[in-house]
Image (cartoon, rainbow, N blue to C red):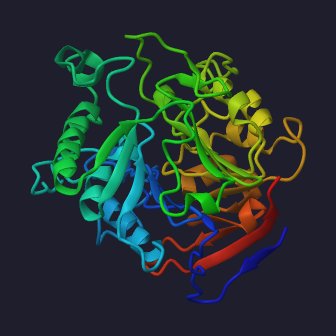
Amino acid sequence: MMQLSFGQNQQLPEWQPGFLDIHHINTGRGDAAFMVFPDGTTMLVDAGDMSETHPRTTSRRNAKLVPNRAKTAPEWIVDYIDQFLPKNQERKLDYALITHYHDDHFGETDSLRRVAPGGYQLTGIMEVGTLIPIKTLIDRGFDFPINLKDQKVQSQERFSKDKYGMIATLKEYWKFIANQSKKVGLKNEALQVGSSKQIRLQRYPTEYPGFSVQNIASNGMIWTGYDDTFYALFEEGEYHGENPLSNVIRIDYGKFNYCTGGDISGINGFGQTDLNDVESHVAPVIGAVDVATLNHHGNRDSQNPFYVRTVRPRVWIQQNWTADHPGEEVLRRITSKKLYPGDRDIFSTIMLQGTKDVIGGRLDQYKSQEGHIVVRVKDNGDTYDVYVLNNTTEEREIKSKHGPYKAR
């Protein structure tokens, strides 16, 4: 597999009709992936924005805000989108998808946040959507397995003592939705498990019949793999935290397949494979893919052996922000040829010194350990390349190119 390095200031070639571009953006504050579908339809998956007042954000074990502190993380996300939005196209996001309600995925309130004219704090997806209009905002809903708008639920100890303020942020999120619905016509929907029609090409759908977005899981509801039927892992009132409720999708373009699943996991508290956890249930319906993001940023509770063996991607992409990621045992699993044969390349948005000190030379298996990671799929899904862009500059020039890979 060819790897190319580039000279100074060489830019990513412009998106062209027929390309599927998936940009994994590194701000140092959580997940954000900007996608341009083959007909120019756009989607943002998550908009992480952790509070600048928390010790975990300012400590050495966490990443710095990049490329600099001149903007907030959401402002940098929008700046990135503005750079790579298809030319001569209306400045908007057709879709935004929030995988679940954690700060590193949708934002977090704090005393430093500015307040929008609509009366909500500017953080995460709320600030992104204020700066660039969102047509359809998809999340996991709010009423299952527990109703997050219920005051009795909000007063539960798990939420009243939540140091990251999920409920406080959700209240701002709901105000943002109400405001933007009136102002720009934003539509808010819960992910429809089993559907391949909810997220679809908006401009020229008939020109790319091989493209689709399949909704795999949400709120512990798992697609069966046929029709739009699903089954539930959790009962009403059974809340195990946000991570297992994450939205999971698979993108198909011809032979090419990509999956991303928020913070789902599959390893139990004793470090053993959990066949009752979300990873083990979604793996059979996801199937083998070309590119997969690491669930839960590569935390040690994720990428169980059954999941790794089943999805067996050619390329793993790690979106991370802390020295906890990856767990060394996760790295062992995703690189094990006993779990699945063949080559695999791993890319990370950032690798912190604490991780390097602990794991050491095993990290040399990564093709890149810092930068925005762009997957560009071409030839009606037959081939794809991976570009690493500089995340320390506002120009985001190419650092390296990997490929071409042949979709399987």
Residue 70 location, x and y as percent? 29, 72
For residue 103, which quarter of the picture?
top left
Residue 143 location, x and y as percent? 32, 22
| Image quarter hosting the N terminus | bottom right
Residue 360 location, x and y as percent? 70, 52
Of 221 and 50, nearer the camera is: 221
Residue 2: tell me if it is visible: yes
> Relative to 31, is 144 on the left or the right?
left
Identify whether 288 is placed above or below 90: above
> Relative to 212, is 44 on the left or the right?
left
Of 256 and 157, nearer the camera is: 256
- Name the residue rendered at 64%, 60% in the picture: 208
Identify whether 235 is placed above or below 104: above
> Relative to 189, is 63 on the left or the right?
right
For residue 69, which quarter of the picture?
bottom left
How many labels, in total?
Answer: 0
- Name the residue rendered at 63%, 77% in the picture: 399
